[in-house]
Amino acid sequence: MGWLFISFTMMFVGALSGVTSCPPSDRAALLSFKNALNEPYLGIFDTWAGTDCCSGWYGVSCDPTTQRVADVNLRGESEDPIFEKAGRTGYMTGTISPDICNLDRLTNLIVADWKGISGKIPKCITSISSLRIFDLIGNRISGDIPEDIGKLQRLTVLNLADNAISGKIPASLVGLSRLMHLDLSNNQISGEMPADFGKLGMLSRALLSRNQLHGSIPASISKMYRLADLDLSMNRISGLIPEQLGKMRVLSTLNLDSNSLSGQIPPALLSNSGVGILNLSRNSIEGNIPDVFGSNTYLMALDLSYNNLKGPIPKSLSSAKYIGHMDLSYNHLCGPIPMGSPFDHLEAASFMNNDCLCGNPLRTC
């Protein structure tokens, strides 16, 4: 009988300790977060009622074992039936309450594309050590990126694009050793890129376009062996294009357009068969276009327009496996346009406003 009593006691204690709903502290944090926001059209916060925030609260998910809130996923543009029924995308105003930081087991915080959420990123966000995805794209968030953002050692996605964020890229950001996706585009971020940006060894996408960054492109970027997409376009970046970028084996998209880059195009950048999209337009790049194309060249887009390039169009372009879109306009190129592919499908706009180019589709030589 003794073992039956012990077994019954253990079951009774287990039942008492079993967690069946979210703790009051998590519920209170969510309600404070809700109270700082106003969503007038869809009524998504109408579901945030009752004592159990793990059950039926729109966009909230909990750890099934601990019943602690693990995910807050609120997207203003979604295929969810609530959007289809309303026949519109989401719109929300207000600010992000610092009380969200009381959800200390949070792994995903996504408050994206609501268009009207303003205020600053709560500094305490860096205390949520479990955070893996932090996505505030498409709002009106202002102020700086928290200086100690590097404390979020589990972060894999940081998306703050399409806001009004200012200040510099924090030096600690390069310490996010697990970061795979970084999007800071279309903000008001200024200053230089950290010289040791290349420490972000797991990063596959670095999207920093449409800001006010200046200085040179850090040579350390070439050490990012997983980087496939680098977009630094529409900034104020100057100096030379690092030759090492052409030796990056995974790099497939490089957008450096609309900056103040000078010097010549590194030959390795054009001979890198992995690069499929290359945009160097609207800079101050000079010299000849390196004649290094070959049968492995597969470019969906090559844009070298609005620079100071001179000399002939490289004949080796004719040996390329594929070139979809190419724009060499507004340079100082001279000589006959090569015949055959890919030139036979390009229009005159791809070659206009050069010094003395001739041949199809321009005037005959």
Image: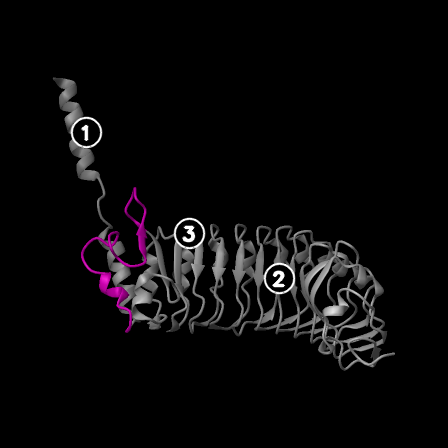
Mark 2 or 1, nearer chain start: 1
Q: Residues within 10 Å of mark 1 (few under 14, many from 20)?
A: few
Q: Amino acid at mark 2?
A: Leu
Q: Tell me: residue 26, above or below residue 164.
A: above
Q: How many marks?
A: 3
Image quadrant holding the C terminus, namely bottom right
Q: Residues within 10 Å of mark 2 (few under 14, many from 20)?
A: many
Could you give the CA–CA distance between mark 2 and mark 3, rounded to whole angstroms? Answer: 27 Å
Highlighted magenta segment, given as a residue range: 40-69
Image coordinates of residue 230 in percent, x first then y, are 62, 61
Q: Nearer the viewer, residue 346 or 55?
A: 346
Find numbered disc 1 in the image and state the secondary structure of the residue it sits on: helix
Which numbered dot is residue 10? 1
Q: Which residue is mark 2?
A: 230
Q: Residue at x 74, y 60 (%)?
A: 269
Find numbered disc 2 in the image and state the secondary structure of the residue it sits on: strand
- Residue at the top extreme? 1
Q: Tell me: residue 179, above or below residue 143.
A: above
Image coordinates of residue 109 in percent, x first then y, are 39, 58
